[in-house]
Amino acid sequence: MRTTLRARTALGIATITGVALIASGCASGGDNTGDEGGEITLTIASFNDFGYTDELLAEYTAENPNVKIVHNRAATSNDARANFFQKLGAGSGLADVEAIEVDWLPEMMQYSNKLYDLSDPAVDGRWLDWKAAAATDADGRLVGYGTDIGPEAICYRSDLFAEAGLPTDRAEVAAYLEGDWDRYFEVGHEYVAKTGKAWYDSAGATYQGMSNQFSNFYEKNDGTIIATENADVEKTFRTVLEESADLSAKLGQWSDDWFGALSTGGYATMLCPGWMLGVISGNAADTTGWDIADVFPGGGGNWGGSYLTVPAQGKHTEEAKKFAAWLTAPEQQIKAFQNAGTFPSQVAAYDDSALTGAVNEYFNNAPVGEILINRANAVDPTPPFKGPNYFKINDAAQQALTRVEEGQQSIDESWAQFVSEVEALG
Amino acid sequence: MTTTSAAPSRRPRSRAPLTGRQRFANFSYRATPYVYISPFFILFAVVGLFPLVYTAYVSLHEWSLVGGDAGWNGLDNYASVLGDRKFWIALRNSVSIFLLSSVPQIIFALLIASALDTNLRAKTFWRMGVLLPYVVAPVAVALIFGQLFADQFGAINNLLGTFGIPPVRWHVDPLSSHVAIATMVNFRWTGYNSLVLLAAMQAIPRDYYEAAVIDGAGRIRQFLSVTIPGIRPTLIFVIITSTIGGLQIFDEPRLYDQFGQGGSDSQWLTLTLYLYNLGWDRFDFGKASAVAWLLFLVIAIFGLINLLLSRRISTEGTR
Amino acid sequence: MTTGPAPIPLLSPAQAARNRRRRMRRLTVAQRKPGILGYAFLGVVLLLSILPLYWSLLVASGDSTSARDPNLSWIPGVHFIENAYAAMTNPAVNFWKALGNSLLVSTTVSASVVFFSTLAGYAFAKLKFKGRGPLLVFIVATMAVPTQLGVVPLYLLMAQYGWIDTMQAIIVPALVNAFGVFWMTQYVQQAIPDEIIEAARVDGASSFRSFWSIALPIARPAATMLALFTFVATWTNFFWPFIVLTPQNPTLPVALSLLQANYFVDYSVVLAGTLVATVPLIILFVVAGKQLVSGIMQGAVKA
């Protein structure tokens, strides 16, 4: 009896060991990044959806047969950020080309010497000035090639608008909403009064849209933190929360319920940067009624957008630079836009008929190319300053907003806590 | 199995003078034990002791994950951690989750153990049954229970609803979130600990019970005055290990929601999660190290309290 | 000589008394009859152990709305394979690589812990050397040290060696541990008569040979249990792998944590992945659960 049990255990362990050896053999087999006969493997790490499909990447390998490309996709920008900085600090392990998001670009610029200099006459003037300037360090080294920007429009549910007796045609909606944030809130109250349902998804997203219209919101250009004394911050914070009492569905962005409400109509409008179009159509595929209006409260706004960088620790920095330059060329970025809605930061793309004529079937055949170009033109050409502490302060602000929306704290309490958290950062 | 050790061997030994070869053999005979035990000591020194001590060094420096050592800054990291509201919330949460997971867990483990400590049919079946959750990884437990305890239409809230109980905000109220996280810990460890206690119970001589029965003690009385004193050392062992583990809880709170930050208001931020967030999200190794030392202190204090309490209990017990 | 019958043990009076007590104890284990209540209580406990797993099977075999469905059927749906496939092929998760890594790490660590612990346990139990007692006490004392708190320097150390995101970073710090040494010392002490070792030495067997061909085979039952517990502990370990590994090269728990960290989370897929990742340990449990149970119970008596 004893022996059989022991024998069975031994057999079990032996089996598992065998499988382990085979599996690890497979795992390490797929991991081969060495040079063989002049062939090189370039790795690119991105997150969420950049629109870099296998087909698009295959175009590059077709032109450069000695190059093999491995694409690693992290799920979220947060995961990518942690991974990026950890390996930047470790001095090894980063991909040859690393995608980074504008929100943590300032944090990264502190370590621009760990990134390969991508300056090149061939790419001068390729991007919007502010886009390239943000990725240029004090020594004039360009360390990131711009991919997309996030010019914001308003996405809305035309079916819900109809129920509330609001205009449904996108041009009429744009005209109706035209104005500042107060106008947007006013129409919201009108909608809520008629339907009893929420106007927008969350205080956090709305606050994000408003705060991005200030040139120095949390920090001065020299990096000094002014978040607690800048009256704009407190005013924006309080306004959003007061309006949100009835306007907000109080669904935190990216939460399960937020995604669910995309289909169920939990909110009627959403601030909509280009890349959000893919998020909506991908997660509420069966819902009809989403549309996009060529309007944004208070003029224009940019939310998000990314860059490609080449870490200096890589083995094939020059090859990687060439690949990044190709991938961020207008032609490729337009294809990425068609795949995932990532709106180009490349000036030449705006005259390209592939972009100007782009239509999105899901959004009731909206001319999204044209709309987003208009929205991009409405963005203030001097972008808001975001220093090394931006990410942390904004994180604290977002949590403060959530606390009020969850009903844990009053606006005053939450603000006081935000102030103390920001002071702890300094 | 036969568990015996023999009396010393009586074979005669030769007393002839040692040759060089024998001298070497003698030396290697003496050195061998140290060679055999050295792997543990070397490894412990390199990956256990050294990091722990070096943590103190890092905690006194401004040190970024990316930029490295940026110089001495004295006790600044400690001052800033102790001045951070989140630290105190994390301390509260860790202690609260630890109490919610260890106290009910030990009570239930005792009950289960005493139910198992009877002449059951299919003993092995029952014992294996209560041990099953132990092989489910904490990460898996957290993913499953995170959904069971979802705020809107989660299975547990749905169940409560059928009894007319309004939904609990498991991911909003601090205490509710602690209960949910403690439930995950209890799910995985209660069965394990009841087997530990069962083993101790089985070592209690039967005649103690007989004596108690003769004195007219009922089941509960027997449990309190025979079983509990009989398993005291094991019980203390279980309590101490669950203290050391419970105060360092990380997996469950980290995966309790999809963001891993411990909640919008740090409702379920624990000290280890706080340490992780400082080190690998804010990239501030200096402050993370300060938290590590403070947590070390907290564990030492709780360990001491445990020791004193259990000493008192055991002296009372022996009388 | 190792295959010969064990020599007749010569018992000292104290040992004989101890053995008698032990036999008594075995006879006097409480023979109380369990009532119907006892069975009912254990039945409920068993149900609570299984229910969360069964519920996740129900969700994992349904669709994205199942986790929130108040009227979820008690019979599993038909989408399990589909959901499990989605989890395993999610490009951000690297499931297969994680499975390979987990198997590699857990087997390597188990084998190494057993080897080094038995070696050290043999030395502590059967060889005489200066400082034996204090050193053993020291080892036991280290079990109470929360070495997990040294993660920052350990991470720096790994970065120094370029081991971030490699399996060495998980395996090497776990090669041997205090519990294993203590456990094997206890076992070897009582299971192997001193005179066998002495006899082997007199017969000219080298110390390592007597370890290899005498101690190791006799210690096998305890070594098996140690291997099992180490395997489970390594397989389920999350904190350190989560810190030092990345999504490109994870172990299973790290990969599972990524299933949820997504912009859109379909929980039927997450739970399907979770179940698939748990299957290897369930198999282990079915094959060797009895050993786990007796391992826990023996360890406890000694603790």
Image (cartoon, helix red, strand yellow):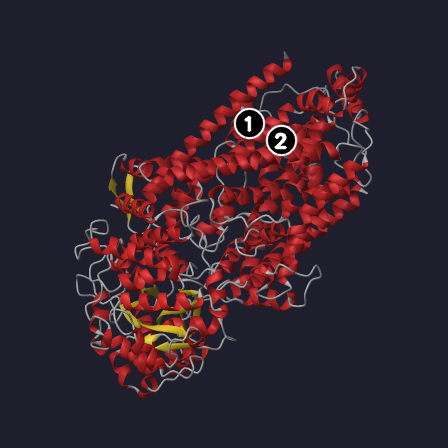
Examine the rendering and report whether any part of residue A81 can be seen: no
Taking the image as shown, residue C73 lies to the left or right of residue B48, namely right
State the separation of the CA atoms marked 2 and 1: 9 Å
At a point 39% along the width and 59% down the height, the residue shown is: A246
Q: Quadrant of residue A280?
A: bottom left
- Residue found farthest to the front: A194
Image x and y of residue B304, in percent? 48, 24
Per the rendering, the mark at residue A382 is none
Badge number at residue C185 = 2
Q: Chain of mark 2?
A: C
C290 over A40 or under it: above or below = above
Which residue is denoted by mark 1 in the rendering? C136
Residue at image point 59% right, 57% down: C274
Residue A364 as seen in the image, left or right of residue C179: left
Viewer-proximal residue among C199 and B313: B313
Is C100 left, or right, of C29 in this rendering?
Answer: left
Q: Is residue B114 above or below residue B155?
A: above
Which quarter of the rendered picture does the C terminus of chain A lie within? top left
Farthest residue, direction top: B319
Residue A15: which quarter of the image? Answer: bottom right
Element assignment for label 1: helix
Evaluate whether label 2 is on the same chain as label 1: yes
- Mark 2 closeness class: few <14, some 14–19, many ≥20 residues within 10 Å: many
Q: Chain of mark 1?
A: C
**Is disc 2 in contact with disc 1, using a CB cutoff of under 8 Å?**
yes
Q: Position of residue A1 (x, y in %)?
A: 82, 43
Q: Vertical placement of A132 versus B75: above or below?
A: below
